[in-house]
Image (cartoon, rainbow, N blue to C red):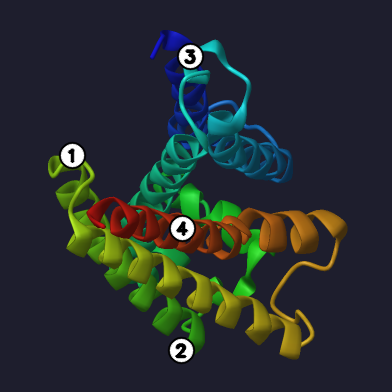
Amino acid sequence: MSNSYFRITAAFAAMLLLAFPISMAYVFVFGGDRALSTTWLVTTFIVAIWGLFVTPWLPLKSLQNIGKMGRLELCVTAWFWVCFMSAVGWELPWILMTDKIRAAKDEMWAYPWWAYIDGGDFRYKRFDCTVGSIETLNVASGLMGLSALLVWLRSRRTSVTAKLLLMLSSAASFFLTMVYYLGQTCAGFVDVGHDFFDLYIRFILLNSPWVVMPVVVWAWGIATFARQQRVAR
């Protein structure tokens, strides 16, 4: 495989890794507008995350000898990293330091959480049993999934147990996110900003991969198991 696929995915990964430091510097070092920074930050995350999922399906020369199953595997692998690292890097610290984060709205270190809290979901400003439970289960699922991902990669993507755990973790992400969505829908979105960007972009679209990609993972898992059974015969 030539470098074109890796260059594109590396660019999207860099966008994800650098988005928070750049927005934090803009707001707290250069005195930039928080609302503008948040708009840029959320947009960057959406473009980068979906870019990682779409890139394997582009007509790149480096992928011309890779079939649909190979492209699908690249797609779900990108999803695994996004899902599990967000659980470890964003949700786990929120669970462990929720009181400190809620009290630090104007401090640089807490901005990665407040960029979502302001308009994305006001429930993160206070102790909310539903959100706390969802995030705790998401973290547990993410830690399990990350462990399974490492085992799967070390087995050269042959471990059946790891693959089943990856599918299970994705199922947990799907149902927990649906509970997260439906809880606010039933409440009339009382804890979400009501302008177009806050409701449809920051709340719905930003979280949408956790509903869409688990379905893709299930399709991948079922297809690979079916192929293995055919080969075994």
Q: Residue at x 44, y 72 (%)?
A: 171
Q: Disc 2 marks which residue? A: 129
Answer whether residue 103 is visible to the viewer in this image. Answer: no
C-alpha separation, residue under disc 2 versus residue under disc 1: 40 Å
Secondary structure under tag 2 reads helix
Relative depth, front residue between 139 and 38: 139
Q: Residue at x 57, y 29 (%)?
A: 55
C-alpha separation, residue under disc 4 versus residue under disc 1: 18 Å
Secondary structure under tag 3 reads helix
Mark seen at residue 156: 1
Q: Quadrant of the C terminus?
A: bottom left
**Is 176 left, or right, of 207 in this rendering?**
left
Q: Looking at the image, is mark 4 or mark 3 earlier in the sequence?
A: 3
Percent across and percent down for residue 168 are 35, 71
Percent across and percent down for residue 84 are 35, 54
Answer whether residue 4 is visible to the viewer in this image. Answer: yes
Identify the amino acid type marked 4. Answer: Val
Farthest front residue?
A: 233
Q: Looking at the image, is mark 2 or mark 3 earlier in the sequence?
A: 3
Q: Disc 3 marks which residue? A: 62
Q: Quadrant of the N terminus?
A: top left
Mark seen at residue 217: 4
Secondary structure under tag 4 reads helix
Identify the amino acid type marked 2. Answer: Cys
Marks 3,1: beta carbons within 8 A: no
Q: Quadrant of residue 94?
A: bottom left
Relative depth, front residue between 219 and 147: 219
Identify the amino acid type marked 3. Answer: Ser
Q: Residue at x 49, y 87 (%)?
A: 130
Q: Is residue 154 above or below residue 118?
A: above
